[in-house]
Image (cartoon, grey):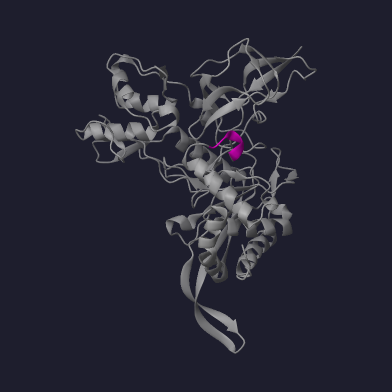
Amino acid sequence: MAKVELVMPKMGESIMEATILNWVKNVGDKIEEDETILEIATDKVDSEIPSPVDGVLVEILHQVNDVVPVGQVIAILETEGAVAETPAVAQSAPAPAAAPTPVEATPAVAPVATPQPEVAAAPAAVKESVPYVPSPAASNGAKIPTNNNGKFYSPLVRSISKAENVSLAELESINGSGKGGRVTKKDLLNYISNRNNGGGMPAAAAPAVVAAVSTPAAQPAPAATPSAPVQKAAPVANTEVSTSGGHEIIEMDRMRKLIADHMVMSKKTSPHVTSFVEADVTNLVNWRNSVKGEFKEKYGEKITFTPIFIEAVVRAIQDFPMVNVSVDPSGTKIIKKKNINIGMATALPSGNLIVPVIKNANGFNMVGLTQQVNGLANKARNNKLKPEDIQDGTFTVTNVGTFGNVMGTPIINQPQVAILALGAIRKKPAVIETESGDAIAIRQMMFMSLSYDHRVVDGFLGGSFLKRVADYLEAFDKSQTI
């Protein structure tokens, strides 16, 4: 009989730990390969962890509600075959001893970064997170459990409950919008806001919570520059504390701390250079507008500009493969990636960002890319992303145009070496060449910017790659059929 270690899988660059929600299997149960063993939760994703082998669950090393670091052994399986005793299981390799934390891609910012497989050591702050149970004073005499009558309260929810004196009875009265009726941070903040305003249950949307303190606190540090991965998020609702000086101190939640740490780490790791180019995307805009109805009817998918942009990025990477690389932890070796895995920044309902990844994007045509983009975006919005959906990105695209921004300077999603920001498409007068000479016409124009790691990507390579993406977009064949 051989023993196999099941480890906590890596959920993405910015996630360094996960909470065990439920053990689906018990010690002594027989398990088939790919059968779910347990359910876990992070601030971004709830996931089921399958068995990597056929066997028997012989030991459980962590219990429900335990917060377990990525790469740590959580259970032991026993198999009948000659299986190595060390393989780390759970659909993803254990995180390297130290892994940085990007935040997802970014809607218009680097994704709220999520550390990648071959990343540098994770910031110490990531290790702070531990389950918290409010004191009797914070919960009106009743400790708030992590699981009560089947209800799970994440460390973040429990922390906010403590700060806002939300009792156990109040928590139980909140109708959670998360998986299985879980109370999310947004649910809790809505409830507190509604309560503070004299109402009962939470309203549809609520502002941040305010609690008085007797002493003024120091001014918060400036928010981290949006960047790709972890995808870079717009500010998230947090607990606000009013002070006598009239200022408000906003305590960062765990995800925001991870984003901040990852952004600082990325800036310290890579000397950033950003290049800009303006592209005339009139042909692709007109083509997309003309076929979107037929495309939807024929394939059941809404075609956006994103798959068109990603197709151009993939082609440019094939022309300039040295932007599809990473630098090993020693800082002296370049790892050239075989696969082209494109991360795309996606906004979450919570206001945070995440960067799901299209694996082997060069293997899809326009229809396939559209299906991938829509599928991952929908899974993200509905909290259905799995760990593998946000892993192994080699290049990230972030759409700053989503917010009407014309350009941006995103922060690199480590350990990648480049991130492309897409600006808003706007109608502008432009000079065009015609058979009868130059003319001024109204064109659909868009700025793009590429931030790259100057350790391994020089201006020639970065600028040439960016220009090639623009060339492919400008040469888009508006006569192509779907």
Q: How many numbered marks appear?
A: 0
State the residue lying farthest toward the left: 198
Using residue 463 as the reference point, say whether residue 48 is left or right of it. left
| Residue found farthest to the front | 297
Residue 117 higher or lower than 404, as above or below:
above
Regarding residue 225, the answer to whether it shows in the image is: yes
Q: Is residue 458 shown to the viewer in this render?
A: no
Which residue is nearer to you in this view: 383 or 437?
383
Q: Is 70 positioned to the left or the right of 87 in the image?
A: left
For the C terminus, give its image quadrant.
bottom right
Q: Look at the picture and state if 189 lies above or below 332.
A: above
In the rendered image, which quarter is residue 327 located in?
top right
Query: What secondary structure is the magenta-colored segment mainly?
Result: helix
Q: At x 39% / y 33%, what residue is drawn?
A: 177
User: Where residue 77 appears, x then y in whole percent?
Assistant: 68, 16
**Relative vertical location of residue 192 with respect to residue 263 in this rendering, above or below:** above
Q: Residue at coordinates 62% horizontally, 65% vertically from top-left?
A: 481
| 387 within the magenta span | yes
Indicate the position of residue 367 as horizontal and vertical percent values: 61, 55
Q: Where is residue 404 in the image (x, y as percent from the top left)?
A: 43, 59
Answer with left or right where residue 38 lies relative to residue 130. right
Residue positioned most to the right: 82
Q: Using the image as rendered, state which of residue 186 and residue 458 is in the foreground.
A: 186
The image quadrant where one finds the N terminus is top right
Task: Write down the region rendered in magenta.
Answer: 385-389
Residue 190 on the magenta segment? no
Left or right side of 323 for 158: left
Can you say whether 186 is above or below 437 in the image? Answer: above
